[in-house]
Image: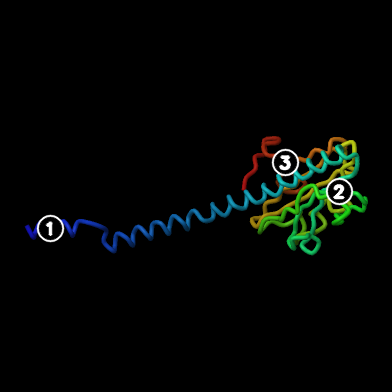
Amino acid sequence: MRRVSDHRSREAGFTLVELLIVIALIGLMAIIGYPALLQILNRIKLTGIARETAIFMQQARMEAVKRGGRAEVNYQKAADCSIGVPCMVAFADRDEDGAFTAGTDNLIAGPYPLPKGIRSWGPPDLAADGANAIVGWADDGPTYLSDGSVETAGAFRFRDAQGNFLEVRIEFRSTGKPVVQKWFGGTNWYENGEGGNRWTW
C-alpha cells in the first residue's frame, strides 16, 4: 500500500526542469512577438491621430456652416497647448485672429494630445515641427468659411517612431473634405488601396 502512494506522489505535478522549459518557451514567444506588438501599437497611434484630426476638420466645417462664421483646426506645440503637450484643437474663430483665444473663441473639440511617440513631422524634415509638418496653411491649420469651403488647401503630417508618415489633406478648397494618406516616398501620398498601393507598416 505504501508503494502505491509513493508512486502516485511522484507522478503528480511538474518537475523543476519541466517548469523551466515552459518558462523559457513563454519568454521566447514574448521576445518573438514583441516587435510585432510594437508595430501594431504604433500603427494604432498613428492612424488614430490622423483620423481624429480628420474628424476635427469635419466638426469645424459643420460649425462654420451652422454659425455662419469662421472655424479652424490647429496644431499646437506643447508650449501653446493648454494641456502642456502637442495637441490638436478645433474652434470657432470669433476674433478671426487664426489662433484659439480662451474666453473669446468657442472650443469645438480638443485639445486632443498627440499620442506618445507620434510627432508633427513631414518628410524630408530632419526633426519634428519642421517646414513640411504643416503644408499649405499660413497659420497652424485650415480655416473653414461659412459656406463649408476652406481658405486654402493643405495638410497636417504625422510620423511614428518607426518612420511611417500619414497626412490629413484637404485637396479641394470648395468641399473642405479631409482625406488620410500614407507616404510612399518622394512626393507620393496615397489613401489605403488607392492605385493599388496598400498601406504596409
Which residue bears the numbered disc 1?
5
Give the amino acid type for the residue marked by disc 2 in the picture. Answer: Gly
Q: Is residue 56 left or right of residue 17?
A: right
Q: Earlier in the sequence, mark 2 or mark 3?
A: 2
The crowd level at tag 3 (other Cα within 10 Å; few <14, some 14-19, many 20+) is: many
Query: Which residue occupies the extreme left position in the image?
Result: 1
Q: Residue 104: percent from the left, percent from the top?
A: 89, 53
Numbered disc 1: secondary structure: helix
Residue occupying the point 57% across, 55% down: 38
Give the amino acid type for the residue marked by disc 3 in the picture. Answer: Tyr
Q: Which mark is residue 190?
A: 3
Give the quarter of the image for residue 77.
bottom right
Residue occupying the point 48% across, 55% down: 32
Per the model, the C-alpha gap separating discs 1 and 3 is 71 Å
Instruction: Name the residue nearer the viewer: 96 or 34.
Output: 96
Per the model, the C-alpha gap separating discs 2 and 3 is 18 Å
The crowd level at tag 1 (other Cα within 10 Å; few <14, some 14-19, many 20+) is: few
Which residue bears the numbered disc 2?
136
Q: Earlier in the sequence, mark 1 or mark 2?
A: 1
Numbered disc 3: secondary structure: strand
